[in-house]
Structure formats: structure tokens, C-alpha cells
Amino acid sequence: MTKKDKAIEILKILREKFGHPKCALDYNSPFELLVAVILSAQCTDVRVNIVTKTLFKVANTPEDFANMPLLEIEELVRSTGFFRNKAKNIKLCSEQLLEKYNGDIPKSMEELTKLAGVGRKTANVVRGEIWGLADGITVDTHVRRLSNLIGFVNIEDPIKIEKELMKFVPKKDWIDFSHLLILQGRDICIARRPKCDICEIKEFCNYGNKKNFNS
């Protein structure tokens, strides 16, 4: 079975399980999503949603954050981890949006990744969620882990993983592919304690097959 065939089968099974997937982050505007994704680095979506529920009542526009003291932003996002760097990026990103884009979120990957705190992962999430655009595949910790366990790749660098996945995952499925692997990673393929015995895609997973064989 080729990697493309395996990817298609996994997509089919996980779509039957999860339905049409959507972003787990709560937001009411493109800017709120951008902020939430910046905060999600090295932090769970559950924690980010708890933080943004309060945060977005205080500030939810580029103007709000650009005018807010950095220390206040830091306190509001402290529990997401790496809060000083995240607060600095959110404030600077807000200033850049006001200066260059009249407060709007640019659509292109090139423009997005020039914003403070915005890498390919963040840009992919925003472009996919807001406009249904896909220049690549979002690779977070779950996608990185599952892609290696399944056998799609044998590398840890997210950018290299993305490039490899793009070679065989159908482009029309790029957005869903990330969402579905993330959902499976949270539900079954949990870091340090994957539930291979009840995994719906174990027959297509190198790690799952090896574990089953050795048991």
C-alpha cells in the first residue's frame, strides 16, 4: 500500500468517526483566531479557550492590543506558558496589522508569516479556517507524532514533515487531514500512552502493527 493509499483510508475512517472536523479553538473573528493560535504554541487548546474567554472580553481587536500595556497582556495570557514572548508577539502583530493592513488579516502565506509570532503552522490554520485556503498542511505536535508513528515520515522537523505529507495527501484534504490527526491524537493516540488496542486506524499504523505483533 502506498502512502497516498494509506492516507486516503485513514481519512475515510477518521471522517466516519469524527464527521466534518473543525478548529478546536474558540473565536468570533479572524483576528481572535490569530491570537488564539499564537497562544496555542506549547499549550493545550482547552487552556487557550479558558484564557481567551476572559482575554477577548478585555481586548479583541488589533487596536485594543496595540494600546494595551505589555504587562497587562502578559498577565492575561500568563497561564498559556511562554507568556512574555506570546504577549510581545501579540502586541507587535497588532501594531503591524494596523500599520500595514488597516487592522485586517492578510490572506497570503507570505504576508501572514511576516507578522510577529506567525509561522507556517499559524498561517495554515488561519488561512484554512477563515478562507478555506491551503498552501500546506498544519503540523502541530499531534500531527508530528502520528505521522511518525503511522510511518508517513521518520523526521521530527515540522516544516520537513509538512513538505513530505504534501507529496501524497490529496490537496483537497490538507485542512481536514490535520484536524483529523489532531482529534485522533487527543482521543486515542495519546502521547506516552497510545491506546493501540482500540485504535480505529491501527491496521494502517506501523507502530500499532509492531506493538500488536510484539504483544
Image (cartoon, rainbow, N blue to C red):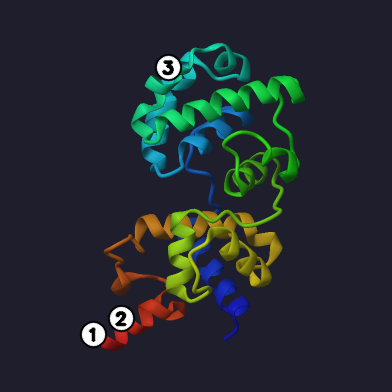
Residue on which disc 3 sits:
71
Residue 129: quarter of image: top right
Residue on which disc 2 sits:
211
Measure how far apart labels 3 and 2 are at the Cα level: 49 Å
> Disc 1 marks which amino acid?
Ser
Is residue 129 left or right of 158 when viewed as pictured? Answer: right
Is residue 103 left or right of 58 when viewed as pictured? Answer: right
> Disc 2 marks which amino acid?
Lys
Q: Position of residue 209 (x, y in %)?
A: 37, 83
**Which part of the image, by quadrant, shows the N terminus?**
bottom right
Q: Position of residue 134 (x, y in %)?
A: 70, 52
Badge 3: few (under 14), some or many (20 or more) residues near its Cα, within 10 Å? few
Q: Secondary structure at mark 1?
A: loop
Q: Position of residue 79 (x, y in %)?
A: 34, 31
Q: Earlier in the sequence, mark 3 or mark 2?
A: 3
Checking the image for residue 215, the label placed there is: 1
Measure how far apart labels 2 and 1 are at the Cα level: 6 Å
- Camera-side residue of 157 and 49: 157
Label 2 close to label 1 by CB (< 8 Å): yes
Q: Secondary structure at mark 2?
A: helix
Residue 212: quarter of image: bottom left
Picture residue at 70% right of the left edge, 31% below the top:
105
